[in-house]
């Protein structure tokens, strides 16, 4: 997948309007590589095209104690860093959409990089795979892959 992302031709910020990534997504928490008692109860992700070719992201995480963490951002899709707000550990991020079905985002918190995430859409448009690349506390690189399912739009 990395080779496909690297080989994809750049897509302008205006291409987000036609992206099938837009919509509401719910994490299949069973795909998290951690013990069940450590998994969040729910993770919702929403992507939307916004004015001026920007991309709006809203993430909501409900943990085992029913505490809700969230993050929101409104970014250009040219890799320019932008601010994120909320209670989750991210305050700066950048995004690019190298293809209409692929989104790459980088996250930082308090000046330190935290992770890079690649979102890729299944051929049928019903599943969104998130591959997260990050570093463990000892500096060892690590990756994790999870699956989000599309939530049908309400009428």
Image: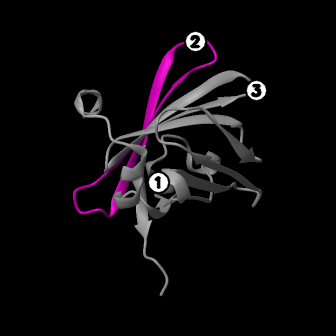
Residue at 49% across / 32% down in the picture?
Answer: 79
Residue nearer the viewer, 4 or 14? 14
Residue nearer the viewer, 130 or 34? 130
Q: In this view, does 43 lie to the left or right of 79?
A: right
Q: Where is residue 24 in the image (x, y as percent from the top left)?
A: 49, 65
What residue would you read off at disc 1?
A: 30
- Disc number at residue 110? 3
Residue nearer the viewer, 155 or 39? 155
136 inside magenta stretch: yes
Q: Position of residue 91 (x, y in %)?
A: 71, 36
C-alpha gap between disc 1 and disc 3 = 30 Å
- Disc number at residue 139? 2
The answer to whether the residue labelled 1 contacts the one labelled 3, judged by CB atoms less than 8 Å apart, is: no
Q: Which residue lies furthest to the front in this view?
A: 52
Residue at 61% across / 12% down in the picture?
Answer: 138
Is 73 above or below relative to 145? Answer: below
5 inside magenta stretch: no
Magenta: main secondary structure = strand
Q: Is mark 3 on a helix, strand or loop?
A: loop
Which quadrant holds residue 150? bottom left
- Look at the image and tell me in which quarter the N terminus lies: top left
C-alpha gap between disc 3 and disc 2 = 18 Å
């Amino acid at each position: 997948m990395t080779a496909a992302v690297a080989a994809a031709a750049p897509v302008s910020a205006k291409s987000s309007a036609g992206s099938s990534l837009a919509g509401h997504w719910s994490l299949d928490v069973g795909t998290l590589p951690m013990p069940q008692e450590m998994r969040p109860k729910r993770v919702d992700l929403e992507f939307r095209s916004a004015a001026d070719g920007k991309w709006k992201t809203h993430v909501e995480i409900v943990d085992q104690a029913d505490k809700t963490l969230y993050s929101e951002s409104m970014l250009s899709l040219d890799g320019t860093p932008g601010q994120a707000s909320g209670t989750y550990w991210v305050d700066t991020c950048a995004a690019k959409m190298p293809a209409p079905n692929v989104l790459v985002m980088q996250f930082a918190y308090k000046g330190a990089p935290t992770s890079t995430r690649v979102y890729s859409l299944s051929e049928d448009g019903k599943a969104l795979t998130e591959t997260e690349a990050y570093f463990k506390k000892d500096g060892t690189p690590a990756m994790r892959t999870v699956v989000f399912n599309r939530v049908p739009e309400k009428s």
